[in-house]
Image (spheres, helix red, strand yellow):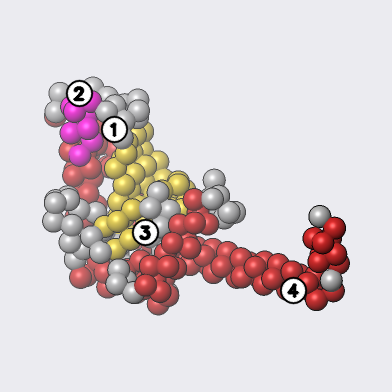
């Protein structure tokens, strides 16, 4: 113990420990600022869809997908000329009653009498993969659709740019959607969500996941 205390009193040792601490602190702050900037850029330029089933029964889960399909089909019909997140949100706001009516009609046509709660807000999304495009966990603006009691499993996707798969088995993102995503994101952000080969960008994606999963971003609620 005395040797340890003597060792710690050594001025060179103390200076080294202080330098190491400052280096770790500086690196952590830089990583946090980087991750926050990239996550903010991504979340600021995409608009997502979140559908929650009434329950986890097979019938309610199947109904969730039918509602999803109906909403996506309608969105695809009215969004041909959309080129930004702001335009997408404005379009959905202006047609929110139609989205609810379509969801309700789908529910009724399939023999259920559940109500639907639809609203646009800022919600937490876990990390999700859409073909070769990956989105880190974080807070995103989204159209949230709650069916009935909304006690069932979730379904998540990206409405703008359109990365929602009605045929989820294909798992292929159309090139037009990728181009629109690239046009709206910074070069660094797009590389992080689209580059599945580079170890550098895989590591950067892990940094985003780490800070989001540990609740270190102010915009995560």
First reached walking from the N terminus: tag 1 or tag 3: 1
Image coordinates of residue 23 in percent, x first then y, are 67, 72
The residue depicted at 29 percent of the width and 32 percent of the height is 53
Identify the residue under disc 1. Answer: 53
Res. 31 visible in picture: yes
Which mark is in front, 4 or 2? Answer: 4
- In the image, is 98 to the left or to the right of 127? left
First reached walking from the N terminus: tag 4 or tag 3: 4
Identify the residue under disc 3. Answer: 135
Q: Residues within 10 Å of mark 2 (few under 14, many from 20)?
A: some
In this view, the residue in front, 97 or 135, is: 135
Identify the residue under disc 4. Answer: 16
First reached walking from the N terminus: tag 2 or tag 3: 2
For marks 1 and 3, give the CA distance.
Answer: 22 Å
Label 4 close to label 2 by CB (< 8 Å) = no
Q: Is residue 5 above or below residue 148?
A: below
Which span is picked out in magenta? 57-65
Report helix, strand or loop for mark 3.
Answer: strand
Image coordinates of residue 195 in percent, x first then y, are 32, 71
For marks 2 and 1, give the CA distance.
Answer: 12 Å
Which mark is in front, 4 or 3? Answer: 4
Main secondary-structure element of the magenta-colored stretch: helix
The residue depicted at 54 percent of the width and 50 percent of the height is 214
- In the image, is 24 to the left or to the right of 163? right
Residue 69, picture quadrant? top left
Image coordinates of residue 124 in percent, x first then y, are 45, 47
For marks 1 and 4, give the CA distance.
Answer: 57 Å
- Please say whether residue 101 is one of the residues in the magenta stretch: no
Identify the residue under disc 2. Answer: 112
The residue depicted at 44 percent of the width and 68 percent of the height is 204
Which of the image's four quarters has the C terminus? top right
Which mark is in front, 1 or 4? Answer: 4
């Amino acid at each position: 113990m005395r040797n340890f205390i003597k060792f710690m009193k050594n001025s060179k040792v103390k200076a080294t420990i202080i330098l190491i601490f400052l280096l770790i602190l500086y690196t952590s702050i830089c990583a946090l600022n980087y991750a926050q900037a990239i996550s903010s850029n991504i979340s600021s330029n995409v608009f997502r869809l979140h559908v929650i089933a009434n329950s986890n029964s097979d019938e309610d889960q199947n109904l969730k997908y039918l509602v999803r399909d109906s909403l996506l089909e309608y969105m695809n019909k009215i969004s041909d000329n959309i080129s930004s997140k702001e335009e997408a949100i404005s379009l959905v706001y202006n047609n929110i009653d139609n989205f609810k009516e379509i969801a309700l009609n789908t529910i009724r046509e399939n023999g259920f009498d559940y109500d639907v709660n639809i609203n646009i807000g800022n919600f937490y999304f876990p990390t999700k993969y859409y073909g070769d495009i990956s989105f880190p966990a974080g807070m995103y603006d989204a159209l949230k659709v709650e069916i009935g009691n909304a006690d069932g499993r979730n379904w998540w996707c990206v409405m703008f740019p359109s990365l929602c798969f009605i045929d989820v088995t294909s798992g292929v993102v159309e090139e037009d959607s990728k181009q629109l995503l690239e046009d709206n994101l910074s070069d660094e952000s797009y590389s992080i969500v689209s580059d599945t080969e580079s170890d550098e960008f895989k590591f950067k994606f892990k940094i985003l996941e780490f800070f989001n999963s540990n609740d270190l971003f102010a915009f995560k609620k």
